[in-house]
């Protein structure tokens, strides 16, 4: 079982009272945060105690995906010194392990050199995207085979559908509305996200990395014209549980 909680879902900067990119995955006793953008550290505490966080995985190092890392590192240090934590936070990203590591409290690791890695009950694999800086899609799989793919930030490329193939949930950026000229923008439109979801035959699509202009609910309407299964629009606090029915037998 994987439980996804959307902590923040806006591109570039947080909405009022909200956050930019941050997604909590829970499986068994494991809690892992995907990206830690602006506002995420505050909102995460509405859902869980920070001392229970096992790890963070970064898709890339644009500010809207990692702005709160420094303060998270302070929180981990303080919780450890107070005796509320007894293990380091695992922090995975694409290289730059020195920015991920903080004393003995945060253990920075690069996934550039490994095909996959584990944090507790979750296994992660990565695929490089097309973006202004090095950026990756992330695939999380639990011990029962439930899987979630998070696109991070990316322009459109065909093999993202291969990476997302068969996922129970595709958490995909939709930074622009259908019809936007995305040349040089290296982000996806809602219809491109849906097209990838359709090619990948994922079970459900969640549109995220939302724009601060227009009506984001139109993103969902546009995606539904290209993908014939469930489409959700990310919003703070949204929870989705991915589970194989056989797990409950
Ligand atoms: Zn972004
Ligand atoms: Zn980016």
Image (spheres, rainbow, N blue to C red):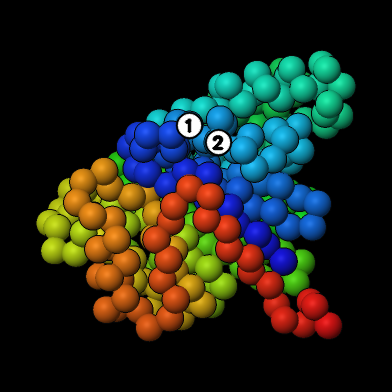
- Residue at x 29%, y 52% (from the top left corner): 175
Which quadrant holds the C terminus?
bottom right
Q: In terms of image quadrants, where is residue 134?
A: top left
196 sits left or right of 204 in the view? left
- Residue at x 48%, y 48% (from the top left corner): 236
Instruction: Classify mark 2: helix, strand or loop.
Output: helix
Q: Which mark is residue 39?
A: 1
- Residue at x 80%, y 78% (from the top left corner): 248
133 sits left or right of 164 in the view? left
Residue 219 percent coordinates (x, y): 28, 62
> Badge 2: few (under 14), some or many (20 or more) residues near its Cα, within 10 Å?
some
Whether pointer 1 and pointer 2 mark residues with C-beta atoms closer than 8 Å, the reply is: yes
194 sits left or right of 189 in the view? right
Q: Which mark is residue 131?
A: none
Q: Is mark 1 within 8 Å of ligand 1?
A: no
Instruction: Classify mark 1: helix, strand or loop.
Output: loop
Q: Which mark is residue 43?
A: 2
Which quadrant holds the N terminus?
bottom right
Q: Is residue 228 visible?
A: yes
């Amino acid at each position: 079982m994987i439980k996804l909680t959307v902590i923040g879902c806006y591109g570039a900067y947080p909405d009022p009272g909200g956050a930019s990119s941050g997604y909590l995955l829970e499986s068994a006793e494991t809690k892992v945060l995907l990206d830690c953008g602006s506002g995420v550290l505050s909102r995460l505490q509405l859902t869980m105690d920070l001392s229970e966080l096992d790890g963070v995985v970064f898709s890339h190092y644009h500010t809207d995906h990692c702005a709160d890392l420094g303060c998270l590192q302070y929180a981990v240090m303080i919780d450890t010194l107070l005796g509320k934590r007894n293990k380091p936070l695992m922090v995975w990203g694409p290289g730059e392990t020195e920015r991920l590591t903080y004393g003995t409290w945060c253990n920075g690791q690069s996934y550039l050199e490994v095909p996959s890695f584990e944090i507790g009950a979750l296994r992660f694999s990565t695929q490089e995207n097309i973006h202004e800086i090095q950026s990756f899609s992330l695939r999380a799989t639990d011990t029962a085979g439930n899987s979630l793919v998070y696109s991070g930030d990316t322009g459109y490329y065909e093999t993202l559908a291969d990476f997302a193939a068969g996922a129970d949930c595709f958490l995909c950026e939709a930074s622009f509305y259908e019809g936007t000229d995305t040349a040089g923008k290296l982000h996806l439109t809602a219809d491109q996200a849906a097209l990838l979801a359709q090619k990948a035959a994922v079970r459900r699509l969640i549109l995220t990395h939302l724009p601060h202009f227009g009506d984001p609910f139109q993103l969902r309407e546009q995606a539904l014209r290209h993908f014939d299964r469930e489409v959700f629009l990310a919003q703070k606090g949204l929870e989705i549980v991915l589970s194989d029915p056989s797990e409950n037998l």
